[in-house]
Image: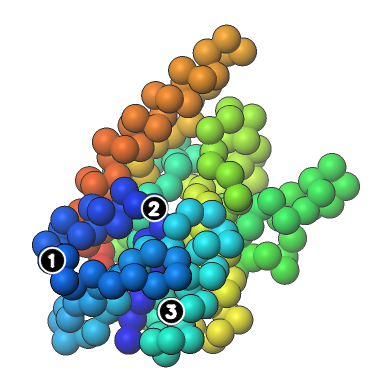
Amino acid sequence: MIGISIATKWEFEASLDYFRVKANERFTYPYGEYFMKTINGRELIFYSTGVRKVNGVGGNQYMISKFHLTKVIVAGTCAGIDDRFNLLDILVPDRAVQYDCTVKEIEPFIKQSFVVDIDLSKYENDFHTGTIGTADKAVVMWKDYLELKENEIIIADTEAGAIAYICKKNDVECIIVKGISDFPKEESNSDKFESNHEQIDIYLENTPKVMHKIFDDYLKKFI
């Protein structure tokens, strides 16, 4: 069985809407809800995990163990870092890193032990790829955005790198499919709250569009 890991409630609600999931087709588990679908003859289980790394890892370890998953597809939104890309662009990273696992003042920004290389060679190469960075905080501060950009991270989220890490520990294939829902905005000292609020509004508006685009154009490529 293939797992589709979805973090936020807005991403999961968009998934429920896309697949027209009925109330009696939704089930609860310790980290959220899940439903099942068969697509192209493959059994898929779509599940919400909640946000941040602990929930992402816990939810995926639970699903891997309970349903004996052979592959996990992490589907959802991300913040754009590389300005070559635009809102709603979909990316499939070939490298996932956790960038909040070091004391950056005295250690490398990214340690090799927290890097997961993702082999995409068996899939058609008709998608954008690169490095996704994961931390236990969203990229809303301009200084964080600049630091990620300097380290050649193209998109960022709060779960995928940790999920890829736990999949590797379980010898389960992991594919990350992320759509850019928002970009951090440069702010002055006086308007940080306003900039953050605007970024959240853009995220909420674009989340259903990203999820529908992933399911329309990308899901079947990787199952």
In the displayed structure, does residue 112 sit left or right of residue 43?
right
Q: Nearer the viewer, residue 110 or 25?
A: 25
Does the residue at mark 1 contact the one at mark 2 (Cβ under 8 Å)?
no
Marks 1/3: CA–CA distance: 21 Å
User: Does residue 177 appear anywhere in the picture?
Assistant: no
Query: Mark 2 belongs to which amino acid?
Result: Thr
Q: Which numbered disc, 1 or 2, marks the residue closer to the eye?
A: 1
Residue hosting label 1: 22
Q: Earlier in the sequence, mark 1 or mark 2?
A: 2
Marks 1/2: CA–CA distance: 19 Å
Q: Callout 2 environment at 10 Å: few (<14), some (14 to 19), or many (20+)?
A: some
In the displayed structure, does residue 108 sit left or right of residue 58?
right
Residue drawn where x is 47% and y is 21% of the image? 195
Residue hosting label 3: 63
Residue drawn where x is 57% and y is 79% of the image? 168
Q: Secondary structure at mark 3?
A: helix
Task: Single out the residue that lies furthest toward the bottom.
Answer: 68
Residue drawn where x is 74% and y is 60% of the image? 111
Query: Mark 3 belongs to which amino acid?
Result: Met
